[in-house]
Image (cartoon, grey):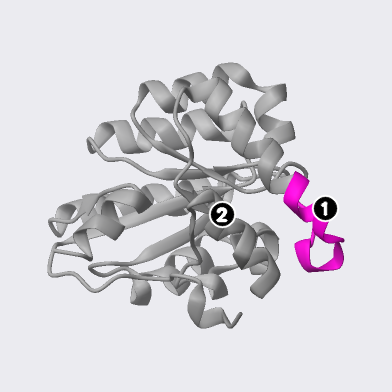
Amino acid sequence: MSSADIIHQVNTEHKAVAFTFDDGPNPVYTPQILDIFHEVSGQATFYMIGEQMLKHPEIVEAVVAEQHEIGNHTYSHPQLTQLKPEAYTDEISRTDFIIKEMTGSSPATFRPPYLDYNEDIGAVCTRFGYSVIGALNGEARDWEMPGVSHIVESTRPHAHSGSMLLFHDGFDDRSQTVEAVRILVAELAAAGYRFVTVSELLRLGQR
């Protein structure tokens, strides 16, 4: 399965973007992200790791209470193509179950760790009914903590109608990400953009 099968953006005339956050939930940084989107009455999508959800159920509850979307990001964040079929299927299915149990809803989208993905993993995602989601701003590389200005400047060219944008709220120090997202959200809000979940952006792409 080629990278073209991973959705990075949708075609839409609606001024809407989807901010996504990987590797949480995190008790320090996820609440800060929630505050940013609360201020603009916007939603985001959090690609959560199953084992982190079990560690921080109160953060999961806060995300759900603010009506954000939770997507599947596996149980332990492995490189899926390096695993045997039963192992990568378990990584996906365990977190699918955890999300259902903790939120009352089935996840609709999946992001493979490292965007490491092939046809066999795609077949599992199809079985679960997932859309597989990438992003346009991979060069921002916020997980490397390259500086707030780098994250912002690398993301700006990709922040347009139908964009899916990738950031991280889990693991390590994510203070640079929080500040970069604060700047980007303020700019886009001033330009009249709406902040929607990935699932909502997919629906807008069909209209």
Q: Amino acid at mark 2?
A: Arg
Residues in magenta, as a range:
77-90
Location of residue 120 by image quarter: bottom right
Q: Residue at x 58, y 57 (%)?
A: 125
Q: Residue at x 26, y 70 (%)?
A: 160
Location of residue 142 by image quarter: bottom right
Dot 1 crowding, Cα within 10 Å, few <14, some 14–19, many 20+: few
Q: Assess whether mark 2 and mark 1 are in contact (beta carbons under 8 angstroms).
A: no
Q: Is residue 142 magenta?
A: no
Location of residue 55 by image quarter: top right
Q: Residue at x 15, y 60 (%)?
A: 191
Q: Tell me if residue 190 can be seen.
A: yes
Q: Residue at x 34, y 55 (%)?
A: 18
The answer to whether residue 191 is above or below residue 48 is: below
Q: Earlier in the sequence, mark 1 or mark 2?
A: 1
Residue position for label 2: 127
Counting from the top left corner in percent of width and height, residue 76 is at: 78, 44
Q: Nearer the viewer, residue 200 or 28?
A: 200
Residue position for label 1: 86
Q: CA distance from mark 1 to mark 2?
A: 14 Å
Q: Tell me if residue 26 can be seen.
A: no
Q: Is residue 82 magenta?
A: yes
Counting from the top left corner in percent of width and height, residue 199 is at: 34, 50
Q: Amino acid at mark 1?
A: Glu
Q: Secondary structure at mark 2?
A: helix
Counting from the top left corner in percent of width and height, residue 107 is at: 48, 41
Dot 2 crowding, Cα within 10 Å, few <14, some 14–19, many 20+: few
Horizontal side of 194 relative to 5 (left or right) equals: left
Task: Identify the image quadrant of the C terminus.
Answer: bottom left
